[in-house]
């Protein structure tokens, strides 16, 4: 099962493996107007979440640790991820979205990714 991603050493190997996982996930997951895709992008410094309708190619709502309401806030990275999850859920509900398909972006469902998803669920977004 080749996905067209070169194998390398060290961190490049990890990035290539994550890219393969993301390609494998995206084969099955797509956002529709009824259930858009909640995409989570995690880096070492921050986390971003977007609600995307893949059919129209539009972003319906987004939130990030770079938003003015979250930037420089108290707490560790998991606490900031929880704030991002609650904020993206609030913005998605304002845009008329009730349910989403979760796209973890090839990352493991643990830590900050799970914290964001749990906070979005608590804010009323259905997965």
Image (tube, rainbow, N blue to C red):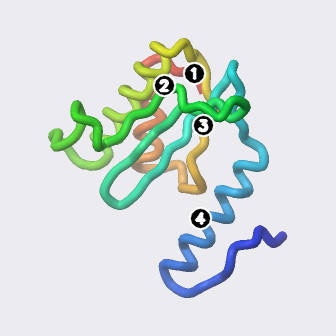
User: From what the image shows, is residue 24 above or below residue 112?
Assistant: below
Rendered image quadrant of residue 1 = bottom right
- Sequence-wise, which precedes: disc 4 or disc 1? 4
- Sequence-wise, which precedes: disc 4 or disc 3? 4
- The crowding category of the residue bearing disc 4, from other C-alpha atoms within 10 Å (few below 14, some 14 to 19, many at least 20), is some
Q: Which mark is residue 102?
A: 3
- Sequence-wise, which precedes: disc 4 or disc 2? 4
Q: 116 or 66: nearer the eye?
A: 66
27 with respect to 115 (left or right): right
- The crowding category of the residue bearing disc 3, from other C-alpha atoms within 10 Å (few below 14, some 14 to 19, many at least 20), is some
Where disc 2 sits, the SS reads helix
- The residue where tag 4 is placed is 18
Q: 118 or 48: nearer the eye?
A: 48
Residue drawn where x is 36% and y is 35% of the image? 84
Where disc 4 sits, the SS reads helix
- The residue where tag 1 is placed is 126
Rendered image quadrant of residue 126 = top right
Residue drawn where x is 75% and y is 72% of the image? 4
Q: Where's residue 117, x and y in %?
A: 48, 35
User: From what the image shows, is residue 42 above or below residue 34?
Assistant: below
- The residue where tag 2 is placed is 121
In three-dimensional space, the C-alpha distance between marks 2 and 3, rounded to whole angstroms, equals 11 Å
User: From what the image shows, is residue 58 above or below residue 47?
Assistant: above
Where disc 1 sits, the SS reads loop
In three-dimensional space, the C-alpha distance between marks 4 and 3, rounded to whole angstroms, equals 16 Å
- Sequence-wise, which precedes: disc 1 or disc 3? 3
Give the label, 4 or 2, closer to the camera. Answer: 4
In three-dimensional space, the C-alpha distance between marks 2 and 1, rounded to whole angstroms, equals 6 Å
């Amino acid at each position: 099962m080749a996905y067209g991603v070169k194998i390398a050493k060290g961190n490049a190997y990890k990035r290539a493996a994550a890219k393969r996982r993301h390609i494998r996930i995206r084969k099955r997951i797509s956002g529709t107007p009824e259930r858009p895709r909640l995409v989570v992008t995690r880096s070492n410094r921050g986390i971003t979440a977007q609600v995307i309708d893949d059919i129209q190619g539009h972003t319906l709502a987004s939130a990030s640790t770079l938003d003015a309401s979250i930037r420089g806030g108290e707490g560790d990275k998991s606490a900031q991820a929880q704030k991002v999850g609650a904020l993206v859920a609030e913005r998605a509900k304002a845009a008329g979205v009730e349910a989403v398909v979760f796209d973890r972006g090839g990352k493991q469902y643990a830590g900050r990714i799970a914290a964001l998803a749990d906070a979005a669920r608590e804010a009323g977004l259905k997965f």
